[in-house]
Amino acid sequence: MSRLNTTFFTGLVTLVPIAATLYFLYWLAITTESLLGSLVRMVLPEQYYLPGTGVAVSLLLVFAVGVLMQSWLVRTVFGWWENILYRIPLIKTIYGSIRDLLSFISQTPETEMQQVVTVSLDNGLRMIGFVTRENLAVLSEKITGADDIVIYIPLGYMIGGHTVLVARSQVEPLNLSKEDAMRFILTGGLAKPGNNPTDR
């Protein structure tokens, strides 16, 4: 019975991530096609419309915006527009949270986590985190020490995280890639560091 259970759960662990990923991609494609497909039909004759045109247009639109954002003028205009959004109470919270999350996922140079570290706590415990900022000039000197840095400590199973200010003396670099460290944290230590998550 134990061998049967192990075999069953091995199959479950193998198939569920694949099925969930495929379903997410399917949902994303259907949603995109539904939203942009109707707009495409407004400007494109029905006989020229093909299934998937909305998805193709969305990919081209994202790429085009990325190209335009390389221009100083476009970035400046976009910055003015963002400043307006950040002045609207409810909008700035929603927009700012979504933008920060996507920037964190995409790991742009401005938001890239710099180093995997362990943070020593007063009770002797250590937590794994990521250095996100070493220059704290944007913060008041009243709430930061002269040698403080910013550490982001994600919590297991995708339930948030903590942003903490700690002294460099409490931080030790960890010889672990950012991807392996994030996988290790999010699975509560179940994932084995390495490129192949099935080797556990």
Image: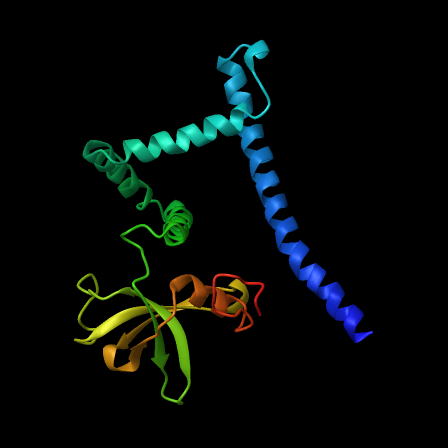
Q: Position of residue 179 (x, y in %)?
A: 43, 61
Q: Residue at x 52, y 64 (%)?
A: 159
The answer to which of 178 and 155 lies nearer the viewer is 178
Q: Quadrant of residue 157?
A: bottom right
Q: Residue at x 62, y 51 (%)?
A: 18
Horizontal side of 56 relative to 81 (left or right) equals: right
Horizontal side of 66 relative to 71 (left or right) equals: right
Q: Residue furthest right?
A: 1
Q: Quadrant of the N terminus?
A: bottom right
Residue 173 versus residue 52 in the image, above or below? below
Q: Quadrant of the C terminus?
A: bottom right
Q: Residue at x 59, y 45 (%)?
A: 24
The answer to which of 21 and 199 lies nearer the viewer is 199
Q: Quadrant of residue 115?
A: bottom left
Query: In the rendered view, how is the structure colored?
Result: rainbow
Q: Quadrant of residue 48?
A: top right
Q: Position of residue 106 (x, y in %)?
A: 38, 49
Residue 87 versus residue 192 in the image, above or below? above
Q: Residue furthest bottom?
A: 123
Q: Position of residue 149 (x, y in %)?
A: 25, 71
The answer to which of 144 and 106 lies nearer the viewer is 106
Q: Is residue 143 visible?
A: no
Q: Is residue 158 visible?
A: yes
Horizontal side of 118 relative to 54 (left or right) equals: left
Q: Position of residue 165 (x, y in %)?
A: 29, 73
Horizontal side of 12 relative to 25 (left or right) equals: right
Count how many numbered circles sit on residues in the image.
Answer: 0
